[in-house]
């Protein structure tokens, strides 16, 4: 019995479906085209995940991540993050050990990377990638993120590449964000512009001088949306100097 799946579907709210479908752009030609919703808000999904993650198996996650419903896929990802985050470090080793019977942190990472085709909207990316991949890669080689940004099969894989660096920023490590931003600097899609701008803004909160140094040779050619996001926290007069130029 898949307790997580049962808990999520039991909270379906038809009155919310139309609004969520519109918000996540599911119409013809839009980035979320064809996605289906149960009408469940994120706080409710988080509440259910907190209650169910300990009883959720890898097989249960497989069933949920394959769902046609957006909220069920989100629940699978948030559960995966929960399982991952409860891992304990073995003494004297950087490698994390088993999180629950039958699942290790490496299993969580492998599952995540094997199912990126089901991580197909910005919220699914943003709520899962940096607390999982970002944390996993803190003490490891990060080439994986560069490969996703450069060669990702979808904009969602490319977005995983940049948004995962949020964890590094929070640990004062900014260079990967700037380097991956360079890979995506002239990407054609607005959702990538927003993601890159957002991560640059977060890096700037840590070190404004580093962000200004990054922007200096690039701001005139970077997408306008990306620039707006990156400088959002600058003083208004300074922000307007960039925008008016």
Image: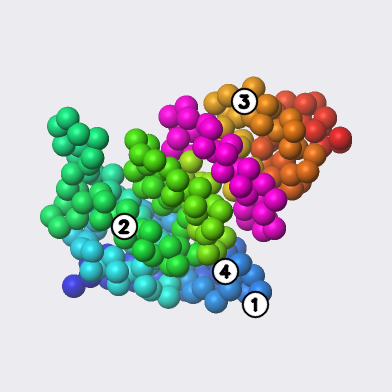
**SS for tag 2?**
helix
Which of the two residues, 43 or 92, is positioned nearer the viewer here?
A: 92
**Mark 4 residue crowding within 10 angstroms, few (<14) / some (14–19) / many (20+):** some
- Going 23% across and 40% down the picture, which residue do you hit? 95
Taking the image as shown, residue 242 lies to the left or right of residue 94, namely right
Q: Is residue 20 magenta?
A: no
Q: How far separated are the C-alphas under marks 1 and 4?
A: 9 Å
Taking the image as shown, residue 12 lies to the left or right of residue 160, namely left
- Tell me the residue that label 4 is attached to: 32
Query: Mark 2–mark 1 contact, CB under 8 Å?
Result: no
- The image shows residue 70 at horizontal and vertical percentages of 45, 68
**SS for tag 4?**
loop
| Residue 19 visible in the snapshot | no
Q: Up-down: is 239 above or below 110?
A: above
Q: Which residues are magenta?
A: 166-193
Q: Give the label, 3 or 4, closer to the camera.
A: 3
**SS for tag 1?**
loop
Numbered mark located on residue 28 in the image: 1
**Mark 1 residue crowding within 10 angstroms, few (<14) / some (14–19) / many (20+):** few
Q: How is the image coloured?
A: rainbow
Q: How far separated are the C-alphas under marks 3 and 4?
A: 35 Å
Q: How far separated are the C-alphas under marks 2 and 1?
A: 32 Å
- Tell me the residue that label 3 is attached to: 210
Query: Mark 3–mark 1 contact, CB under 8 Å?
Result: no
**SS for tag 3?**
helix
């Amino acid at each position: 019995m898949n307790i997580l799946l049962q808990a999520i579907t039991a909270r379906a709210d038809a009155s919310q479906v139309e609004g969520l479908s519109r918000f996540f752009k599911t119409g013809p030609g839009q980035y979320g085209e064809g996605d289906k919703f149960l009408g469940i808000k994120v706080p409710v999904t988080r509440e259910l995940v907190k209650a169910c993650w300990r009883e959720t198996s890898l097989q249960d996650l497989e069933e949920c991540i394959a769902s046609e419903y957006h909220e069920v896929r989100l629940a699978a990802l948030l559960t995966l993050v929960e399982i991952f985050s409860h891992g304990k470090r073995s003494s004297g080793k950087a490698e994390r050990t088993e999180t629950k019977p039958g699942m290790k942190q490496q299993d969580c990472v492998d599952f995540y990377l094997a199912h990126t085709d089901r991580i197909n909207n910005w919220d699914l990316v943003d709520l899962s990638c940096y607390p999982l991949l970002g944390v996993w890669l803190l003490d490891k080689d990060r080439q994986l993120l560069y490969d996703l940004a450069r060669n990702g099969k979808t904009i969602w894989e490319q977005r995983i590449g940049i948004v995962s660096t949020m964890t590094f920023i929070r640990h004062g490590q900014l260079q990967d964000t700037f380097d991956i931003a360079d890979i995506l600097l002239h990407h054609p899609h607005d959702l990538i512009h927003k993601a890159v701008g957002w991560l640059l803004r977060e890096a700037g909160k840590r070190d404004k001088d580093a962000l200004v140094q990054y922007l200096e040779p690039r701001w005139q050619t970077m997408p306008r949306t990306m620039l707006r996001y990156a400088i959002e926290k600058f003083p208004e007069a300074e922000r307007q100097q960039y925008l008016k130029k």
